[in-house]
Image: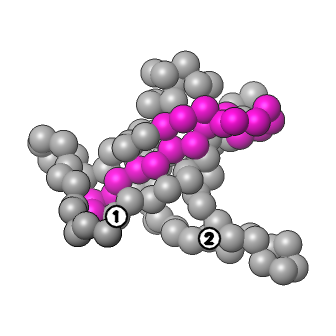
Amino acid sequence: MPNNVPLPPPGNQFTFVLQIRPSPKDGHVKAYADIQYHNVTIRGVSVVQHNGGHFVGFPNNVGKNGKRFPIVEFSQPERSQIEKLVLDTAAELDLL
């Protein structure tokens, strides 16, 4: 595996959407996104429809007891900024 690190887009933006794709199944999950946060790639961020709106779900693992455990967590204001970026990108691509 090569040790290539993608460069962020020009400017001072360190968080951006690498890819967003529609969900292959019908249901509440409308799309999946891969994002770049500084030099970390986070794959499998989901765009979920709920109660007439949409929210962003971050990747997690399900334990043997059915409880979900986050793989990555963000505190505010980064979490809100990432959610807005992903939802805006999904809307631009008519995935919502």
In three-dimensional space, the C-alpha distance between marks 2 and 1, rounded to whole angstroms, equals 16 Å
**Residue that protrudes farthest toward the left in the picture:** 11
Residue 26 on image: x %, y %: 79, 32
Q: Is residue 53 left or right of residue 16?
A: right
- Magenta range is 20-39
Q: Residue 75: x, y in percent? A: 46, 65
As helix, strand or loop, the secondary structure at mark 1 comes to strand
Residue 33 in percent (x, y) is at 51, 44
| Circle 1: residue type | Val
Label 2: how many residues lie within 10 Å, few (<14), some (14-19) or many (20+)?
A: few
Which element type, helix, strand or loop, lies under badge 2? strand
> Does the magenta run of residues contain 22?
yes
The structure residue drawn at horizontal position 44% and vertical position 31%, both measured from the top left corner, is 89
- Residue 27, compared with residue 2, is above or below; it is above
The amino acid on which the numbered mark 2 sits, given as a three-letter code, is Pro
Asked if residue 52 shows in the view, the reply is yes
Report the residue that reaches farthest toward the bottom: 64
- Residue under the point 62% across and 25% down: 96
**Residue 70: mark:** 2
Q: Is residue 50 magenta?
A: no
- Picture residue at 34% right of the left edge, 64% below the top: 40
Name of the residue lying farthest toward the front: 1
| In the displayed structure image, the side of residue 87 where residue 25 appears, left or right | right
Residue depicted at x 80% and y 73%: 67
Q: Residues within 10 Å of mark 1 (few under 14, many from 20)?
A: few
- In the rendered structure, which disc, 2 or 1, sits on the residue that comes first in sequence? 1
Residue to which mark 1 is pinned: 40
